[in-house]
Amino acid sequence: MIIACRSWSTVARDTLVFHADHTGGLRIISISDPENPAEIGQCPVGKVKDVAVRGNYVYTATYDSAVQIIDISDPSLPAKAASYNPGFNRTYRIIQHNDLAFVACYSNGLLVLDISDPLHPQEIGLYEIEKIFRIGCL
């Protein structure tokens, strides 16, 4: 299988791969048959740079529209469920930990969101630092 895209990030969970595509949004690939992976869903939500998966939702860091939240309860029909735009864009990375999402925002710093209610994310903090591209966890 060949997918023409600009790849940024990929996360696997069970038999699904969630792929950040800079030109096509979120792509969902089934690896239930590892020798024959197949794209089963796509959600065009902008220039996706990174993805994090929690429950039935994928959280995306997008270059042009901040954080998008996608319902994947039916992976073949992913749908935008909510978004959070703090007034700036160019988000590069997102990490989910428990009820928090940490978002690397290029010109603004590290954004902390409470995602305990996926449909209503709330900003709870911002550590201002310029030119942050990557974040990670141990």
Image (cartoon, helix red, strand yellow):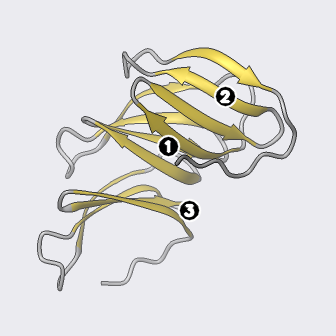
Query: Which quarter of the figure has residue 94?
Result: top right
C-beta proximity under 8 Å, tags 3 and 1: no
Which residue ends up furthest to the left in the rendered image? Answer: 33
The local secondary structure at tag 1 comes to strand
Distance from disc 3 to disc 1, alpha carbons, whole Å, reads: 14 Å
Q: Nearer the viewer, residue 27 or 122?
A: 122
Identify the residue position indicated by label 1 in the image. Answer: 60
- Label 2 is placed on what type of residue? Leu
Spot occupied by residue 98 in the image (x, y as percentages of width and height): 39, 28
Identify the residue position indicated by label 2 in the image. Answer: 111
Identify the residue position indicated by label 3 in the image. Answer: 23
The local secondary structure at tag 3 comes to loop
- Label 3 is placed on what type of residue? Thr
Which residue ends up furthest to the front in the rendered image? Answer: 138
Left or right for 108, reference 14: right
Q: Nearer the N terminus, badge 2 or badge 3? A: 3
Residue at 43%, 15% (x, y): give it: 120
Disc nearest the viewer among 3 and 1: 1
Spot occupied by residue 109 in the image (x, y as percentages of width and height): 77, 34
Distance from disc 2 to disc 1, alpha carbons, whole Å, reads: 13 Å
Which residue ends up furthest to the right in the rendered image? Answer: 130
